[in-house]
Image: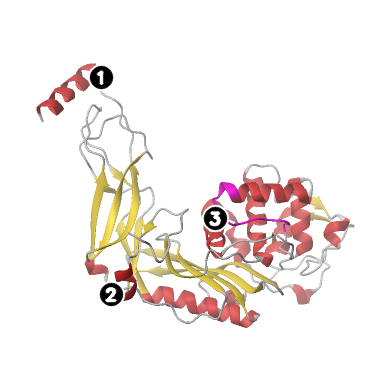
Amino acid sequence: MKSLLPSLRSLVCVVLLTPAMLWAQVPQPPEIAARNYMLVDVTAGQVLAAKDIDAPVEPASLTKLMTGYLVFDALRAKKITLEQRLPVSERAWKMPGSRMFIDPKMQVPVDDLLKGMIVQSGNDATMALAEGVGGTADNFVRLMNEQAKALGLKNTSYKNPEGLTEPGHTTTARDLATLSTRLMQDFPQYLHYYSTKQYRYEGTPASNSNNRNSLLFRDPTVDGLKTGHTAAAGYCLVATSKRDFPNVGQRRLLSIVLGAASENARANESQKLLNWGYTAFDAVKLFDAGQAAATPAIWKGTQSTLKIGRPEAIVITVPAGSAGKISTEVVRQDPLFAPFTKGQPVGALRVKLGDEQLAEVPLVALEDVGQAGIFGRAWDAIRLWIK
């Protein structure tokens, strides 16, 4: 079954949309004035709209999403602290483009450098962080590319930590969506940096304090993520929004808009995508976090059944008004033999919309089940032989 609207591979839900569904049931996105775009329902793990998402593009300051990921990872590993002061090298001080306006006379806390990089898009702050975490900028770039590979960013190559134009410094809309999703999932404790509307370091110009993401000022549900611009890249924005819905809770969407004509255009087109995603599709919660989607019989174990499901809620997205046409089916190996470890893959939940398969969600064991003793295993072997 061919997927015309692709799944985001790093997410739980595998989306399968057939040609019949695409034309008969799936809403068509609005006209988006951008070279590339993508809309992802992060809660459901489904791609709602896409255009040229595997075409190579220059990421500009969207590069700083990966720089942020590595800094957050260093914080998690306690290699650095938010209070730690980092030196400002001559190279960092002389960085062209957007700046935080720090200089070599300063020792700047990591917390402030993160705000300078994310809120002000400061290339000087970015270089100071890269040198502080990686030792040198070149070594930090090596770490960026290693992390890209680890995250499954198959079409991304970094040449610098800040995003200035350089041959071979490229990514794709799909890779940006994967990186952004992992950033939000892996480091929720640091997402407040991306929703900060204003910041300036003491002694630097007040006129440089506004976050470049103007959607933060327009839409109270938007809480990130990052802007970018170079002459080659055009105006770019990775935006994310979370809104509350009955029976589902918070539903998060992520939009990627690349190559727009202006700052205003990238914000308008991103807002258009987000609003369309929330209105054209409904989110349906099939199972709560930790709720068993099935309890199949098992053999040769310390108990006779196994609860299988997901540690997080299973939510899918369907065209508005079509929730009543959903049906589900659990597929798994049969018979199942103990032992099982909590989190072990067991099967999948197939979700259909009418007669068409919409999604396939991997299911895991929700509990540990040990292997039975020798007599229990022998008894089950006899029962299976008779069966």
Q: Which residue is mark 2?
A: 321
Q: Quadrant of the N terminus?
A: bottom left
Mark 1–mark 3 contact, CB under 8 Å? no
**What secondary structure is found at the residue carrying circle 1?**
loop
Q: Which residue is mark 3?
A: 188
Task: Report x, y in % for residue 273.
Answer: 48, 76
Principal secondary structure, stretch drawn in magenta: loop
Q: Is residue 109 visible?
A: no
Compute the Cα span from label 1 to label 3: 44 Å
Q: Magenta span has 163?
A: no
Work out whether residue 45 or residue 72 is closer to the camera in this orientation and state it: 45
How would you rate the neighbour count of disc 3 (Cα within 10 Å): few for under 14, some for 14-19, many for 20 or more? few
- Look at the image and give the residue range highlighted in magenta: 149-161
Kind of residue at disc 3: Pro
Q: Residue furthest left?
A: 386
Q: Earlier in the sequence, mark 1 or mark 3?
A: 3
Compute the Cα span from label 3 to label 2: 32 Å
Q: Which mark is residue 373?
A: 1
